[in-house]
Image: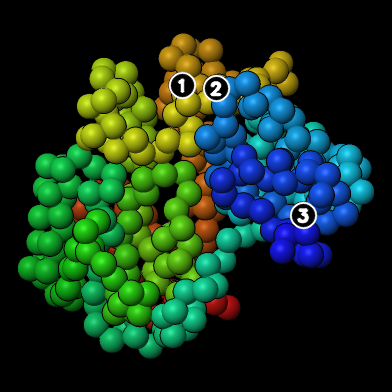
Amino acid sequence: MLKMADLVICSYPYVLCPFLGTYEGFKDTAMLTVVKGAGSMAEYAHASLVPWILGIYKRWMTATDSGVGTPRKVVCADAIDPAIVQATFGDHVSPQLVDFGARYVLHLAGGVQCDLRAKTKTLLVWRLFSIFPGLDAMAMNTILSGFQNAPPPPWKVELMQDTIEFTYKDLQDASAILQVPWDWALVSFMEFLALGIPLILPNRDYMHSLITTVYWSRLANRSVWSLSWKRRFLQLVPEDWEAFELGASNKSLKMTETTNYAHGGSMLDHVAYWWQHTEYAKQRMVKTFDSLSHLYTVLNHLDPKIICERLHW
């Protein structure tokens, strides 16, 4: 069946794409590789194959002649991916970014329904157990639930737990979603924006500190870290970057526990560098807060319907 195709679209796991793209039987077939998570391009590959795999990707991203009879095109789907690719292969590589629009949710949820944003003031707190250790997540959920008893205008607070199943239509009941990201890019983040649901995130200083805490915590006990912090922000965890061949032109990718950083003098500075390339930092209309009192103010001044409409202008 593959040999009959005019175009092969290859994606995760990305280690398969170089094998397909260099297979003699596909030499006359065009291939598009969509990378969403550039830090995982060599995931699952044996260490001996990593240089070859990344070498193929570099050739496809830099050369007009991919080395085969038909084009081999690689595009990135997350805002942070081009920055990771350039740090890996050098600044002369400029991969095309094709935004992940999550258009499928419009069909699954019945389209953008901005009128529903104003129907009831419901704040959906999104899966805090996905990022925080259990007791911390429980405490935060309890505190945030207390917003329901705050002075008017009242907000209904619903907690989305990891174990709760939902449909995309269920999301239409939310006036806004509070999310604390647990990776450098999240599919759910883009899905919420596609539906026109206002997003509220902790501000960048808090996220810089949180990610730095996650990374430093792994040094004490990797097993305990995996259980408590759930291996979050794994794509750029320092010791998991052995897949990247780091030359003199791209040392910026390797994060170590020394003070010799290309983008600052500390782990916090380096995290801040990568954060600016994320969808969270780039997307317009995303609200942020720096404290619980600030969050209360943000909610009091939030107009979910207007934000929904502006997201789709």
Q: Quadrant of residue 41?
A: top right
Q: Which kind of residue does numbered mark 3 sit on?
A: Met
Query: Residue 239: which disc?
Result: 1
Residue 99: image location, x then y, percent: 62, 60
> To which residue does mark 3 refer?
31
Q: Which residue is painted at 21% across and 58% down in the image? A: 163
Q: Earlier along the polypeptide chain: callout 3 or callout 2?
A: 3
Element type at marker 2? loop
Measured in 3D between alpha carbons, the distance from the residue under mark 2 to the one under mark 1, in whole angstroms, is: 7 Å
Front residue (pair 281, 53): 53
> Image check: 152 left or right of 193?
left
Q: Is residue 306 above or below residue 188?
A: below
Viewer-proximal residue among 170 and 154: 170
Q: Are marks 2 and 1 in contact (CB under 8 Å)?
A: yes
* Residue closest to the eye, 240 or 308: 240
* Residue position for label 2: 242
